[in-house]
Amino acid sequence: MLLFILPLIAVALIIIPLVSAIRKQKLGLEINRKKTILMNSGTFMGVMLLMTVLMPVIAGAESADAAAVAAAGATIGDGLKYLAAALSTGAATIGTGIAVGTAASAAIGATSEDEKNFTKSLIFVALGEGVAIYGLLISILILFS
């Protein structure tokens, strides 16, 4: 249980200085940017050091659970399969975001100059979105093979 809660606490500790700076900015107060960056960097380094020290201790304490999972038939190959599926979907969607972001801005510019370019521009935006579908398809093939 602690293995799942500890990363959430780490993320919360890293985000707190940023939330504080955003709140000050919304209230119209002056923000010391150098202090905010140093505080965020220090918090990040401290949390990473703490996680480096605590995670092996927690993992060792939960080794009995790992033995139960191994007895159930889960292998390292299953974990790598899930990692590969996640990476293929993640990389494809990042690529899609880049492609659609560039193509959509160009499509808006082309359409604003001449409305006849809308359908041609829409095709290029849709081609970029196809990359995400291919990544999802590869993920499904990896998971069910």
Image (spheres, grey):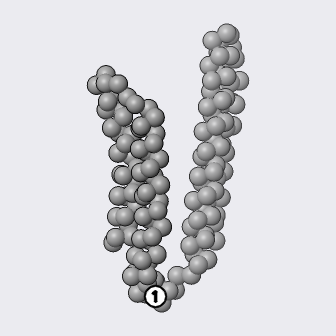
Q: Position of residue 72 (x, y in %)?
A: 47, 86
On the question of residue 137 being in view, the answer is no
Q: Secondary structure at mark 1?
A: helix
Q: Position of residue 108 (x, y in %)?
A: 62, 19
The structure residue drawn at horizontal position 57% and vertical position 75%, both measured from the top left corner, is: 78
Quadrant in which residue 125 is drawn: top right
The structure residue drawn at horizontal position 33% and vertical position 38%, both measured from the top left corner, is: 20
Q: Position of residue 77 (x, y in %)?
A: 61, 77
**68 vs 5: above or below:** below
Please give left or right for residue 145 compared with residue 71 in the image. Answer: right
Q: Position of residue 13 (x, y in %)?
A: 36, 52
**122 vs 68: above or below:** above
Please give left or right for residue 28 compared with residue 129 in the image. Answer: left
Q: Between 74 and 15, which is closer to the camera in this rendering?
A: 15
Say what amino acid the circle numbered 1 marks. Answer: Ala
On the question of residue 73 being in view, the answer is yes
Please give left or right for residue 46 compared with residue 99 in the image. Answer: left
Residue sitting farthest toward the top: 113
Residue sitting farthest toward the bottom: 71
- Location of the N terminus by quadrant is bottom left
- Location of the C terminus by quadrant is bottom right
The structure residue drawn at horizontal position 40% and vertical position 76%, both measured from the top left corner, is: 58
Quadrant in which residue 24 is drawn: top left
Q: Between 102 and 14, which is closer to the camera in this rendering?
A: 14
Q: Between 66 and 100, which is closer to the camera in this rendering?
A: 66
Query: Mark 1 sits on what residue?
Result: 67
Q: Between 31 and 129, which is closer to the camera in this rendering?
A: 31
The structure residue drawn at horizontal position 56% and vertical position 73%, both measured from the top left corner, is: 79
